[in-house]
């Protein structure tokens, strides 16, 4: 499948997450000035990473699927942003060293609660028991990934345990807010903005 958007062409290889309502919700709300160092967790076709690179950002895209990483690299090349992007196949953010200092982290994670049926549950959308597993792991790692004034933007759904995520962010001492919402026919999407709390004194 080939998608032609305003400023980019995205090929979707079989078995790679096709850009969907949640992808476009995040894309529509991304406000970048250019020059930011961006991390895209669960990059899929690389669509978010490539949009950021087209805005002049330097982007690292991660995905657990080797095919997604190859697809994202292909898309970066045809959109002429391979010099601004780097894609890695890995589990969550495990290979990144401390002090990467990303200005922006974007994530459209798998957020659907598992059904328990292996024919349905796929890493593309299976977010574990309550839909928060990848989100929770990234929050656990966020302190060492974000620059001092950096921001995480991630998509959450009314189908996942949003209250649990917000409480985890508070306990981990991050400021968070819902900055956009979009109602779809079977769920509501939320865009959550997360920043480090300013240190007192
Ligand atoms: C909902 S898709 C989003 C893809 C793309 N960012 C978009 O918005 O179209 C979630 C992506 O997360 C990836 N993923 C799932 N579990 C992961 C993990 N543990 N570590 C890294 N990526 C993961 C999936 O392979 C999939 O590409």
Image (cartoon, grey):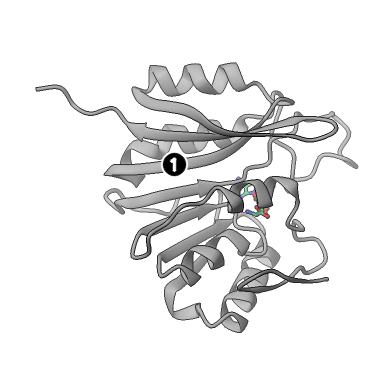
Q: Position of residue 175 (x, y in %)?
A: 37, 26
**Residue matched to label 1:** 152
Q: Position of residue 177 (x, y in %)?
A: 47, 27
Q: Residue furthest front?
A: 6
User: Image height check: is 80 above or below 175?
Assistant: below
Q: Quadrant of the C terminus?
A: top left
Crowd class of label 1 (few under 14; some 14 to 19; many from 20; radius 10 Å)? many
Q: Is residue 93 visible?
A: no
In the rendered image, the quadrant that contains the N terminus is bottom right
Q: Nearer the viewer, residue 83 or 134?
A: 83
Provide residue 111's location: percent of width, then percent of height: 69, 35
Residue at screen point 74% across, 26% down: 159
Q: Residue at x 38, y 60 (%)?
A: 33
Residue 130, picture quadrant? top right
* Residue 109 figure quarter: top right
Compared with 146, 60 (above or below) is below
Residue lying farthest to the left in this orientation: 201
Position above or below: 144 against 46: above
Mark 1 element type? strand
Instruction: Report the side of 66 relative to 16 (left or right).
Output: left
What residue is at 69 percent from the left and 69 percent from the top? 5
Q: Is mark 1 within 8 Å of ligand 1?
A: no
Observer-nearest residue: 172 or 28? Answer: 28
Q: Is residue 199 visible?
A: yes
x and y percentages locating residue 129 in the rendered image: 72, 25
């Amino acid at each position: 499948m080939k998608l032609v958007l305003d400023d980019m062409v995205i090929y979707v290889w079989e078995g790679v997450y096709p850009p969907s309502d949640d992808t476009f919700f995040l894309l529509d709300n991304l406000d970048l000035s250019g020059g930011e160092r961006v991390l895209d967790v669960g990059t899929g076709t690389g669509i978010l990473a490539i949009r950021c690179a087209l805005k002049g950002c330097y982007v690292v895209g991660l995905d657990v699927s080797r095919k997604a990483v190859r697809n994202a690299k292909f898309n970066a090349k045809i959109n002429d942003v391979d010099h601004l992007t780097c894609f890695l196949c890995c589990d969550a953010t495990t290979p990144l060293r401390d002090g990467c200092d990303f200005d922006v982290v974007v994530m459209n994670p798998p957020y659907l609660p598992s059904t328990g049926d292996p024919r349905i549950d796929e890493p593309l959308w299976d977010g574990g028991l309550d839909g928060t597993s990848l989100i929770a792991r990234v929050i656990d790692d966020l302190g060492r990934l974000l620059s001092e004034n950096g921001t995480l933007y991630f998509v959450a759904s009314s189908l996942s345990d949003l209250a649990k995520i917000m409480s985890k962010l508070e306990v981990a001492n991050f400021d968070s807010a819902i900055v956009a919402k979009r109602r779809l026919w079977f769920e509501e999407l939320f865009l959550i903005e997360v920043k480090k709390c300013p240190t007192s004194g």
